[in-house]
Amino acid sequence: MQHTLVTLVEDKPGTLNRVASLFRRRGFNIESLTVGHTDIPGVSRMTIVMDCDQESAKRLAAYLYKLINVIQVEDLTAKPMVSRDLAMIKVNTSAENRAEIMQYVEIFRAHIIDISNTSIIIEITGDEEKINGFIDVLRPLGIIEMVRTGMVAMARGATSLISNNGKLLNELISA
Amino acid sequence: MLRTGAQIIWETLIREGVEIVFGFPGGNTIPIHDAMLEYPIRHVLGRHEQGITHMADGYARAGQKLGVALATSGPGATNMITGIATAMMDSSPILCITGQVMSRFVGYDAFQETDMTGVTLPITKHNYLVTNTHDIGRVLREAIFIARSGRPGPVLVDITKDAQQASIDWTPDDSPIQLAGYRPHPSPMPDKVEQAIQLINEAKRPVILAGHGVLLSKAMQELRMFAEKAQIPVAVTLLGIGSFPASHPLNLGMMGMHGEAWVNKAIQQADLLLAFGMRFDDRATGTTHTYAPKAKKVHIDIDLTEINKNVKVDIGLVADLKETLQAMLPHLKENNHDEWLSLINEMKGESAVRDIQNLPDNGHLYAAHVINDIWRITNGKALVVTDVGQHQMWTAQYYHHDEPYNLITSGGLGTMGFGLPAAIGAKFACPEKEVWLVAGDGGFQMTQAELSTAAQEGIKVNVAIINNGYLGMVRQWQEFFYDRRYAATPMRGPDFVKIAEAHGLLGIRVTQRSEVEAAVRKAQQTEGTVVIDFRVEKEDAVYPMVPAGASLDNMIRRPIPEASK
């Protein structure tokens, strides 16, 4: 099953390496990992998506917690959350199918961000399923290349990541 | 104050209480070693960087304080790897300082450049690369704090030569360490303490599993009060030896692959296991599929990643053991588990007749005799360091420790070559203690160059080489599981007496049981390090033995000797 972990990390040299090394060392596979700044200077936020069982996700979250440069970690999988992925897809076009593509773009609420005589680049944002659906529609037209950012996620509601250490520990070790 | 980076290193170490550094110089530590001459620091020059790292480890474990090792970049630093990994597995607080090439050369494959923070990432608790003199003081303070606190471990600080050389205006900083993501001291979990107490008070066949964490948390007194109040027997892990007095009636002895049969049987029959600062290592549990099937399990460990890692537990408490036991003690019901204790006593049954100690002297010298005699002659008070292999298990079985911190051994990593340098480090930490190294002939040869260090430093370590001319533990596995095909295990060693003499030290050879006592006493009375070459039975095995991957109570037992049948 797909698990979504979110961590706040210190923005220091080597931090990404420490996180990535953990996956390798403990034998986990990353589906996607995104890193970017937060509103706090010196603190970055990672969203890590992995395909594993519940127990492995717990273990991994605990190991992340233990890293000195990791400030917070939370498994959002079972919690109400919103997640977004962004893709840029370059597609073959011709005079005949351009209108068809524009229609798909409209239906999926995507954007065209570049256009040439024989190709266009489409930008689409959404959860994974929506983007997968869009790609399926475009595939018969001939995808030249594609890039996805990987997922970013956030819990719904007014809460931020758990900051109470005792509560967090309890959550991380509960079987 | 105007200070060079090198001076800041020493001033920071001294402010943190460091008195001894185990080191080996090189091109990229010359500024550090040069500045050292101005400071009240004892520098012990090892013969190999693996040696100095094990020395720092032995020093840390024996003295319950930080051990510091200093090596140069490249090969000097990579030679430390085995020592760092050993300290990591056994939670030993050491600080490894390595010189690094000039910062402008970092990343350019300069002479003697190795990416040490990259290389040591998975085997350190944390590590740092310092390229700016202004960061040295802060980083060293953080590194020492991290190494010592929480679950201790090795921290490596790699400092470029230009950072060592540059001068800055520097004032020492004593402000509290601020590390946003590091929470080494979780508070006891009150609701879980309550749940655990309920299980404990209701248990009929409880066993305490005491590990290294008891010693690291200094919870010996609390453990004893706990065991005595509720009359719960205590089994110890290899690294937990000394956490509970061996002679205490509630001490069962060591558990695991070479644990006593009754200990493993008791664990398998228990209805409650109380794991105190231990991590259910595979050598302690046997296969986890059939491990303690009837037992509820309560696990207290300061490291959250140990909870539910190897064995699923009913209650996991992430907290300091000493504080948690203190919180539990007032609620612990006074109890007696007479029925359970006498059942365990029955299980001891025929073990005595299987014990090699009880065999009549047949002219052969057995390792068990040697170690048991050393125990007797040193009144069980020696600080014993071992290498890794059969002799290590025999030492665990036949040297009984009532005092804590008196057994130092490489448990988790099982590092051959650990013994001699660790013993030297331990002696520096505890000069008042009588230090004995028990080593095999194989492991001893791996780091025997450190005899030269002992001789140069005038340090006294009594070395007992259990010499059977084999890599004995591997030979034993070959005997039991590979049809006695002794591939690459027969080993012709050097004349250890002459090796000792070549270092200006006394060497003694012992081939008979009757000669053991005199040799041990001679070693005790001689100034300086003494090496005794005990020529023991060549094909003796460590019993009992749980084969790797088998159930804990599925043990290969010593065949009952004919005479006592």
Image (spheres, coloured by chain):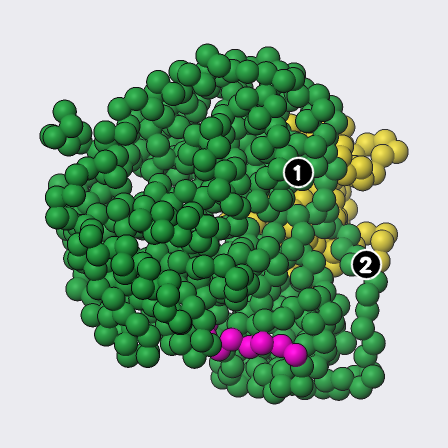
Chain colours: A yellow, B green
Q: Is residue B357 left or right of residue B436?
A: left
User: Which of the 4 quarters of the picture holds residue B258?
Assistant: top left
> How far across and how far down the image is residue B490, in percent?
16, 57
* Chain part drawn in magenta: B40-50
Residue behind mark 1:
B322
Residue B454 appearing in the image = yes
Between the residue at mark 1 and the residue at mark 2, the CA separation in whole angstroms equals 24 Å
Residue B107 appearing in the image = no
Q: Amino acid at mark 2?
A: Pro
* Residue at left offset 59%, top offset 16%: B335
* Residue at left offset 40%, top offset 76%: B455
Residue behind mark 2:
B176
Q: Is residue A36 left or right of residue B375?
A: right
Q: Residues within 10 Å of mark 1 (few under 14, many from 20)?
A: many
Residue extending furthest toward the right: A158
Residue B503 magenta: no
Location of residue B521 with respect to B353 vertically, above or below:
below
> How far across and how far down the image is residue B443, in percent?
31, 60
Location of residue B12 with respect to B547 vertically, above or below:
below
User: Which of the 4 quarters of the picture holds residue B47?
Assistant: bottom left
Q: Is residue B350 left or right of residue A58?
A: left
Q: Secondary structure at mark 2?
A: loop
Which quadrant does the C terminus of chain A fall into?
top right
Q: Secondary structure at mark 1?
A: helix
> How far across and how far down the image is residue A166, in percent?
75, 35
Q: Amino acid at mark 1?
A: Lys
- Which residue is more in the foreground, B201 or B464? B464
Q: Earlier in the sequence, mark 1 or mark 2?
A: 2
